[in-house]
Image: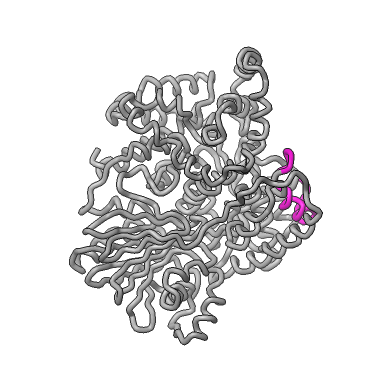
Amino acid sequence: MCGICGIYGRASPDELIASTRTMLDTIRHRGPDHQGIHGSDRCAIGANRLAIIDIRSGDQPIHNEDGSVWIVYNGEIYNFKELAKGLLSKGHTFYTNTDTEVIVHLYEEYGTEGFERLNGMFAFALYDNSRKRLVLARDRAGIKPLYHCGLYSGVAFASEMKALLSLKDRSYGLSLPGVAQYLAYDYTPGKNTVVKDIFRIAPGTCLIGSGNGIEEKRFAGIKIRTEEQPTGISHSENAYILRLEDVLSSTMKDQMTADVPVGIFLSGGIDSSTIAYFASRINPGIRSFSLAFEDPSFDESRYARMVSDKLGLTHRSEVFAYESFIGLFQHITDFMDDPIADPSVVPTYALSRLAGRSVRVVLSGEGGDEMFAGYPTYIAHKFAPLYNSLPKSIREKVIGPLISLLPVSPKNFSLDFIAKRFIGSASQQVIERHTEWMGGFSYGELGLLLKEGVFASIEHSIFRPAEEIAKQTTGLSDPERANIMDIFMYLPDDLLAKIDRATMAASVESRVPLLDNRVIEFCMSLPFEYKLRGISQKRILKKLMKDKLPDVVIDRKKKGFGVPITQWLQGGLAHEAEALLSQEAIEGMDIFNHAYIARLLREHLQRSHDHRKKLWSIMVLVRWLQRYRTSLGL
């Protein structure tokens, strides 16, 4: 695992190397073991290395036999030994035992078409000196991040946006459409970011910079089922279960490859517990890590302990209290240069630091809810048409008023929170409905939050990313369409970005076995009813893991890695909220209506409404704006 960056453009080699070194210094946490730069007359590329494989000779940049192709790379290629064997048979010679060098020779042999053969998580930059071109590429699921912007009549790139923001020869501005999308989704989906002219490279895509300009090329993707699912479960379900076991077994064997200790983030949910089961068959007694919360509605530590006891893991757990949260809040938000309104990034960082005391690599369960349809919102989409079939008078004059009487509860997935969000968006079409259930501010609420001129300039762009995905899912059921939206938006741009930043801030590599190419291809080929049937979720995974894990882990409802932000905002965090959301701070930005924000905060502190998601979203964005206002010219 590494942090990479570089520049391809019309500048002197000294300028290119100096700017690359400046960027590397801002992301040193991603690779504390070694820093290396390669420069030429048109390009400089650099890497901060966190050594995982071939610790002795794997420092980057790495090159081919004659030094005409150089690479910097972040990630892991799980089939690199198989690829290396084939390349050796074609006459290529290797001077390291790394997966990094395999990519160089793969490019030599097959060009960018060879990238489709890679099974792994990766973001890399190849400089082809003989053709004077830079090639940037990112894995098909979007596990590893890669950003780019224009510079020196060419392109600059980096693993984190803060590296690009550190460049003194480049000016930036705030993207108002990006801000609106962040507030609607809790993150910015797709290629665009909250910074004007800084973009993400799309998953499964390579960007090629040459004398002819910039070319974007797709080399791999996640295939979407296009037909409606069958109405009944096929007699081949057992065959699918056996196939899933084979896929997970082979996947875990490859994902455990490392020359440093490997551990597991163990929540006690079925995803991380499944990973723990297969990992423990390969490495008995493997280390696992979890956090405990004082509020039992958020605490999963007893389930993690049950799993660790059953599987014979070496388990460590720590209590994550309010004092831990507030102590890390400002620190971790400095690492979140691409803002995400997910407070669980803070305990994820704490968990990463706990794991980092004894391992360099952790296996985590991201992707399980997307691959096996585990979110409760998918069930809600099933009930939305039934709710909408009720007479409008019943919905508005009976159900709505009754639900509004439910007392506000700070508990995790409380009844009032779920019910109010359900009826608030159930009448919308699936795109808007799912966005509002999963995100922060609804379309109407954005009109209240943003100043009139700001909202008018961006209102038509808010749902555009979701609409582009939805075009590929016509003919599927609403739950499956929502699931596809999550796979292509929420997963790469929220969950995977969060786990990357939180673990790398602690100089720990995270791997996500449930997003291995083999798992993705198997799951995306399944009829949706093998994942969600009635209100039974993750059906095939639960059937596979029955008798392998404690029954309570298989049968319990999804809890999620949440934090009790509702009561913390009503307690010690209230002072932080009042400072960040003060009239002086808000009006100075000329983006938001302070009166609306003040109302949200007042209602939350009075416990008459639960505005946890909205308040946290604004707080993260305001803190981000304060942190980067100079770079943005604000």
In the rendered image, the vertical position of residue 439 relative to residue 602, given as above or below: below
Instruction: Please identify the residue farthest to the left as the structure is shown.
Output: 12
**Residue 451, x across and y down, in percent:** 33, 25
**Residue 310, x across and y down, in percent:** 75, 56
Query: Is residue 537 highlighted in magenta?
Result: yes
Name the side, left or right, on which 532 lies relative to 424. right
Colouring: one colour
**Residue 233, x across and y down, in percent:** 77, 48
Please indicate, yes or no, whether residue 572 appears anywhere in the rendered image.
no
Residue displayed at 57% across by 55% down:
223
In the rendered image, the vertical position of residue 517 relative to residue 465, given as above or below: below
- Nearest the viewer among 379 and 327 is 379
Q: Quadrant of residue 521?
A: bottom right
In the rendered image, the vertical position of residue 422 relative to residue 345, given as above or below: above
Name the side, left or right, on which 578 lies relative to 252. left
Magenta part of the chain? 533-552
